[in-house]
Amino acid sequence: MDLIRIGAFELYPSERMLCAAGKPVDLGARAFDLLLVLVEHQGRLVTKTVLLERVWPRVIVDENNLPAQIASLRRVLGAGAIRTVPGFGYRLELPVSDGAAADSAPPSIAAPRERAPPQLSVPRRAWPSRLGPLVGRDGDLNELQKVLGQACLVTIVGIAGVGKTRIAQEILARETEKPGTSVAWVSLQPLNEAQHIPSAIALALGLSLPEAADGFAALRQALERTPVLLILDGAEQFGDALATHLKELVSQTQGVRALVTSQVPLGVPGETVYRLPPLPVPHRGMAPPEAARFAAVELFTQRAAAADRRFELSPANTSGVAEICRRLDGNPLALELAAARVPALGLDALLERLEDRFRLLRVPGRPTNPRHGALHTAFDWSYSLLTASEQRVFNRLGTFAGSFSLNSAARCVADETIDTAEAIDLVGRLVDRSLVTALPVDPPRYALFETARYFAVGRLTAVHELESAQERMAATMLDLLDSAYQEYWSLDEAIWLHRYEPELDNVRAAIDWAGAHDRTLGVALYGSAWPLFVETDLCAEGRNRFAQAVTLLSDALPSNRVGRFWEAVTTYDSDRQCDRARYAAELAAKMHAATGDLRSHYYALTQLAFNWRGDDSAARAAFDAARCLEDPVWPARLLTHGALTEGALLMSRGQFVEARTAYRRAVRLALTVSDRQALAATVNIVELDTACGDTASALQLGRPLALSLRHSGRRETRFELLGALFNALLIAGDITEARATGAELFELAHRLDAAQLYTVLDAMAFLACVEGRYGVAARIITVAPALGVITCTTSGFSRFSNSQQSR
């Protein structure tokens, strides 16, 4: 028999009849259809949309018709028969069973049976649509599923646009395929108040909650023994209002798990935070086939091809795509928006306009969504969730061009309203909100992704604070460089580099800004930066910056800053442009003498002596003056420089025994600073052995030293050693190895500067003469000026002439 029992009522669907105690009940057609839909869902929540579609198919009706029909059903079935879930829909509260099951039950049984744990049938219409395959996230997906198997509360955290929602969608799809567990998707973005969250969860689960009850308490009761995974998307706007209730929900039920996407962790006990990184991007200089395998390149290529079927990744355009991926930090949202611009702009124009990325990366006509819309909109949403103090700190951190330490950040952002301790705490909060990235290094360093930095600079510009913030950052870098300068002379070189080399990008940005806006800062930064540029093999950059920096000098500047400025110049030019190096050393010595800085005065005098090597009396006078100042308790690096200068002067005079003693003293002193500094000092002994004619000793010491220097990062020192080896090999008659060493010299010179390239061409001309290839030698010497290789030396010509005469 076609019979369904609804509480005390009998429903005959095929007869379209409802009976009470066997007697038909008068019920309208729409009300009857409405009852059929509610019975079909058997106690689960039915949304208004579903009811309207099923009861009034293909008809546009006023929503007020629905409450009217519900009221007519309640008059027949009883006031409590249908529960209203405000804003969502309705649920039938009466028990439903088929006629056979009802007939088999004894009529005398009145006590209710204990219910088994409910098996939820989650309405899929609330699920988000999937937008094609997920690129580059297999590792993250596998790790997240592993974490979900071990933890009840997992939060996916990441910067705007990184793909938190998208990866949660994929988790939803994967978990749905597993038997025995219900999965529900709950979008929190449309909600304005935390009190609406329980109703949103209930709607996603197909439940109805008692009216006027504590929503989360009712959820805990309804889901006490129900295995279910709740995926809550976009929780950052609710904070503690959600965190505590969600923790209680998962901890006080037996089967509820929660996966949350947010820009900030919930911060409750038992939470497992999974920080979703951007997609990996290829390094600069990587070969196209290798770069093409990176997930960011794959995503960009896929989306660009979808926007323009003619687009293909090729060896010719892979480097451009890779650069776009790097500039956009591997952020999936930014990559997708950029790829959509390829048909209109092409790769080259797109890359050129990335500095204006927030205006560029929008989709015309696309509805604005606070979390998933254009790039600027996504960052605006994140920024709007910050407090005023957090916003101020984030803005100022945008002036850093590279990573920064916590101390530098605090120094840069602290002001009359934010002290250093609070600044450190605020930086930590920005890390939690994924707007600042904590780098996996020791000691900890932090950074803004390039897109976040552009956004922060934009905010500073909008409130007219950019220049003051940049000045603050430049002053912070000067304090840091002053500390680095003092530590340079005594701290182990490896430790010193580990501490200060990561500041290079910030130092460059500070020098660039100060050069255009603040003379005093510009001169001071240039002067104190020289140890950093020297130890990172960037002497050429230091020399290239001289033309701009020298225009900043004025008589009003402090003598100690001007002295250190000229100290930097003489260091960069030493043994390259000897005339300017001597001039700078004389000025530095004069300034340091006036300020009473004995150590700096000593260093300037040794530089003066070193660059006077061709003039015995002047060099000796400068070095004797330095020796009068020398104190044996000074740092080893400074004394090493003095010993090396002494050795160079003695060798130029032909006093080889005394020079060897000085060089060995330099090596002993250098070993107390670092092995790397000792390697640099040992190169001078190779040069000395070559000058003495002891090529066997020079080669025995120089060959293994050359191998060591290949991995030390000291290109300048390596160049000097290879030059000495080249000469030793020529003297020893080993032309084959000399030719290989010359090729290595030439390759290295291309990465240094014109002066070094001239030295190599000079050596190549001499090698050609030794081999009897005079035409080749002549062409090398002739072409050198055309290559821009012009120096004051004429040794190449003299060697060539002498070789011809000897023949």
Image: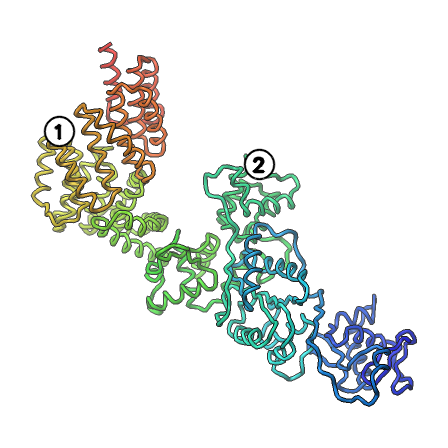
Q: Nearer the viewer, mark 1 or mark 2?
A: 1
**Residue 393 lies in what quarter of the image?**
bottom left
Residue 263 rendering spot, x and y as whole percentages = 51, 63
Secondary element at image label 2: loop
Give the class, few, some or many, for how many residues have Cα within 10 Å of label 1's Cα (few <14, many ≥20): some
Marks 1/2: CA distance? 60 Å
Instruction: Tell me if 366 is positioned left or right of 153 in this view.
Output: right
Q: Which residue is mark 1?
A: 656
Instruction: Tell me if 617 is positioned left or right of 257 in this view.
Output: left
Q: Quadrant of the C terminus?
A: top left
> Which amino acid type is shown beneath numbered disc 2?
Ser
Residue 546 rendering spot, x and y as whole percentages = 28, 40
Q: How is the image coloured?
A: rainbow
Residue 724 rendering spot, x and y as whole percentages = 25, 28
**Residue 342 lies in what quarter of the image?**
top right
Residue 32 rendering spot, x and y as whole percentages = 85, 77
> Which amino acid type is shown beneath numbered disc 1?
Phe
Q: Which residue is mark 2?
A: 314
Instruction: Tell me if 397 is positioned left or right of 323 in this view.
Output: left
Secondary element at image label 1: helix
Q: In this view of the protein, can residue 377 be seen by the observer?
A: no
Please say if 583 is above or below 31.
above
| Rendered image: mark on residue 157 | none
Give the class, few, some or many, for how many residues have Cα within 10 Å of label 2's Cα (few <14, many ≥20): few
> Label 2 near label 1: C-beta < 8 Å?
no
Q: Quadrant of the N terminus?
A: bottom right
- The one nearer the camera, 489 or 795, is 489
For the point 56% across and 54% down, which residue is it? 333
